[in-house]
Amino acid sequence: MNEFRKFLLKNRITPKWVIFALDLFICILSYIYANYLLNDFKIVFIEYENLWKGMAAIALVSSVCFFIFKTYQGIIRFSELHEAVTAISAVFCSFAVLLLVNIFLLLVNETPFIPYSVLFVYFLSASFVICGYRVLVKTLYNSGNEETEAVNVIIFGAGNRGSMLHKVIGKTYNNGYRVIAFIDDDEMLVGKNIDGIPIHALSQIVPLVKSFRVKFLFFSRSDVDVTVKNKIVDYCLDLHVKVLNIPALSGLIDGHLNLNHVKEVRIEELLGRPAIELSNPDVISYITNKKVLITGAAGSIGSELARQIAAMSPLMLIVCDQLETGLYNLEYELQKDYQLADRLKYYIGDVKDAAAMEQMFRLYRPDVIFHAAAYKHVPVMESHPSEAICNNVQGTRVVAELAEKYLADRFLLVSTDKAIRPTNVMGASKRIAEMYCNTLQNSKRNVDTEEQFVYRMAGTQRKTKFITTRFGNVLASNGSVIPRFREQIAKGGPVTVTHPEVIRYFMTIREACSLFLEAVTMGKGGEIFLFDMGEPVKILDLAKKMILLAGYEPGKDVPISFTGLRPGEKLYEELLNQHEKVIPTHHKKILIAKNPDTDSEPMQQEIQELIAMATTCNDEEVIRLMKRIVPDYISNNSVYELFDSTYESDSPGVAASK
């Protein structure tokens, strides 16, 4: 028996003709057995001529039935109930055919050459043996599998995917896993079992892991609530259990589970709050009939926004960036995945270049503009304030004024939580861009264009709606903390955190882009849209969890070092300031902040003066003007802190208020 088991384990797949021949041999043998059984095993009473005729008939009819039912195509050691039913069906079919032949012979007054009793015994014995040897082979194979050294695993999710995953693990001899329990958050399933494996509640994870020395937990489902998933991951990481996601069952090639197929649970899946799901049919109906322009389209935000809009089949999609390679790759991806043909336009240009942007607007005349082009890295902009103003403020002014000139319906500015009570150049520059868009929204001026003239002659006035969206840190975006930590962990550390108390709001790229699409559809002009992103995340905790998810011990296998706050960085971010009024929307997670109206003309003059100063690269004067325009811009951990006191002593507004 041991030798046979070794043969099974060594020879992975038995040829089809061998299974076919074995099934046929069993049928013939069963027929012979039936004849001997019904003659009390007395050879002298058997008519051998009829026996040979019956054997030939059995062989012929059974061969045809096996061919029709394809009983030889299954892998015996992986046989399931439906394969046993198929085999019995084939034997029954051969029995039924021969039975009908007997009935026909009886009707024409001929003697049946196979007695009815022989046929019934043949059917029962052949069915039993054909199913029995399949069960035997599978049992021997699985017993050999159990004797191998395997690690204990738990499967979360006892539904269809969990059951199928258990079967796949059981079928694979060399996967090194042994399922000892299912875990599920559905109380209706707790206490039951699947294939003899018990289903436990969430609260049983810790005792199960300790009792059975579990090494892995597989998530068989992708729809696990993030709160539940966080709880499970925390349990497992504390007990040094590795948590893994299983891909779609179609990805389990040939029914085998391999570590190359499973994926580590990524930190992006563990936001600490449920993912914000938006489903507004008005978004699709609005975008479908519009020409849409995205600036900064080659970036992580712009490219995801382009994908979501491309899926809505807009009238035209214009993607603009100054990065040639990034734009080329995006254009290739969009055409491959969405087949936009000539409805997709790509334009290489710098948003600061008024002539280039004018040409683009004149060519395509977009209806909706998503302005995502911006410099975003705080330490870099702290060293280049003039560039920050040129790109983030002047670029916004150029595109926004062209949107107004060419009668775009809506202009959406992509802003940041760092614009609230800014402590750095980047945040202050984005705040000024917000203020400029607000002045355009409140402006009473008439733009002198041919298109606007036509509207005025018709007795109407078309005005572009300027909308702002504000969000926190975007998980896994270019240059964000997640890819940086992942790279540092892969190299063995150290993982660098600026300060142990730094906290940040996080959202996924997909959530951010959903906010833009909702905002541009809902916006009436002058609003600032933002998400309720729950509680902020401590960056140190984020780093520790990423190290644990990678299978290492924080501080031991991968060290963590504190580098100190970077210039302009603050410990926490905000999404609102004290002057902004919050208005709820149709979705409980989307809020609208309304800024108080400001005198448009003086503000525009100050911003124009700031842009002119930035073009001369006079960084000190640029900072002074920024602090005058944004009074709550107070530098933190920066060389520009000295201008805060200077501005306070020189500012007539501040002096008058004292």
Image (spheres, rainbow, N blue to C red):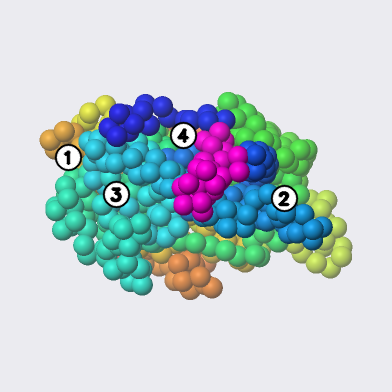
Q: Earlier in the sequence, mark 1 or mark 4?
A: 4
Q: Which residue is mark 4?
A: 387
Q: Earlier in the sequence, mark 1 or mark 3?
A: 3
Q: Where is the C terminus found, in terms of image quarters?
A: bottom left
Q: Residue at x 36, y 28 (%)?
A: 7
Nearer-the-camera pick, 477 or 256: 256
The reply to whether the C-beta atoms of the residues labelled 3 and 4 are less than 8 Å apart is no
Q: Which stretch did the figure color magenta?
A: 19-48
Q: CA distance from mark 2 to mark 4?
A: 34 Å
Q: Earlier in the sequence, mark 2 or mark 4?
A: 2
Q: Nearer the viewer, mark 3 or mark 4?
A: 3
Magenta stretch: includes residue 624: no
Q: Nearer the viewer, mark 2 or mark 4?
A: 2
Disc on res. 179: 3
| Amino acid tagged 1 | Pro
Q: Main secondary structure of the magenta part?
A: helix
Q: Residue at x 19, y 56 (%)?
A: 208
User: Mark 3: few, some, or many residues within 10 Å (few <14, many ≥20)?
Assistant: many
On the image, the x and y values in percent for residue 459 come to: 84, 68
On the image, the x and y values in percent for residue 484 come to: 33, 35
Q: Earlier in the sequence, mark 2 or mark 1?
A: 2
| Amino acid tagged 3 | Val
Which element carries disc 4, helix, strand or loop?
Answer: helix
Disc on res. 314: 2
Q: Which residue is mark 1?
A: 554
